[in-house]
Image (spheres, rainbow, N blue to C red):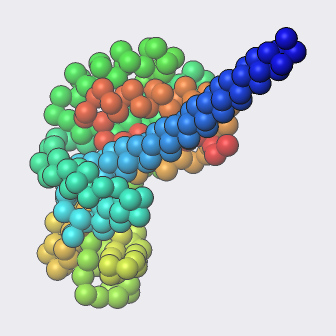
Amino acid sequence: MKFRNVLLYNRYTNILIQETKRYAGHSKWQNIKATKQEHDTARAQIFNTLSHKMKAVAIESGNSDPNTNPKLANLVEQARKANMPMSTLKGILEKIKNVRTGESHILPMRIMKGPTLAIHILTDKLTYVKANIVHISKKFNAKVIEPSTFSHLFDSVTFVIASKDCNLDSAMEDAIIANAIDVEEIKDESGTYFKFKSEFLHPEKVITQLKILGYTILSTENKCIPTGTVQVTEEELLNINKFKQKLTLEIREIVKIEDNIASL
């Protein structure tokens, strides 16, 4: 009888050990799977961010060729370093070839009594697009503010990136002739460029004069630079990012969104 009990004990002990190993293996697989999912999610977010930035640069500058658009070329290089599949990268560049046209607009919005957003829009139907943005904004307690209020919160300017075989001194003289506000020299791996500061949203006159002076226009960029920043909590920042994401996903006329949020 005792011998039988020992056999039964050994048998159930072996079963328990096997089951324990099986569940341990299952747990290990679940951990590996969870880690892979986290990695894939983070990777997808990086790719989506780069894709959106490439699209925004192409739309804003009107130049979808990375060979002549330094900002786009830089983003393409970032995508390669992030190991974006070549097929994905080619697909993105193909999609942004036919960049949209329209007038550039800024829609300033404030979230509650907190930070302000500068929503860059490219459209010929501003009233329609604005109505859609306002509709979405109600769910996030955001409201359109007056341009006069916005002008105190941001320094807004349009930059014209151009190239010419000359030095900075010559470029400064040309900036005066072209009625640009300022100019700075930019150097990177692909060459030397000049960044001319012009009237916000209206760089046409500066561009025309620079072309006459022999410059090749590479791109334009509208920037709203905050004069000060606003502190937010992590929870508030999460909600603001959700708001931005919803806007950019649902309203294709939005080029980019800038803000005056302080870094956490």
Residue 34, picture quadrant: top right
264 with respect to 201 (left or right):
right
Percent of width and height locating residue 250: 30, 26
Q: Quadrant of the N terminus?
A: top right
Q: Which residue is farthest top?
A: 1
The quarter in which the C terminus is drawn is top right
In this view, the residue in front, 135 or 46, is 46
Name the residue rendered at 16%, 34% in the picture.
Answer: 124
Q: What x and y, as percent, mark residue 242?
A: 48, 27
Query: In the picture provided, is 55 more to the left or to the right than 233?
Result: left
- In this rendering, the count of numbered labels is 0
Task: Give the image quarter of residue 231.
Answer: top right
Residue 247 image position (x, y, % from top left): 37, 28
Residue found at the very far right of the displayed protein: 2
Q: Nearer the viewer, residue 37 or 52?
A: 37
- Residue at 50% across, 42% down: 36
Which residue is rendered at x = 16% and y = 43% of the image?
Answer: 100
The front one of 20 and 80 is 20
- Give the percent coordinates (x, y) of residue 29: 56, 36
Whether residue 261 is visible to the viewer of this picture, yes or no, is yes
Residue shown at 17% from the left, 80% from the top:
214
Q: Is residue 16 visible?
A: no
Instruction: Pick the residue in front: 264 or 229.
Output: 264
Q: Is residue 117 left or right of residue 3?
A: left
In the figure, residue 228 lies in which quadrant?
top right
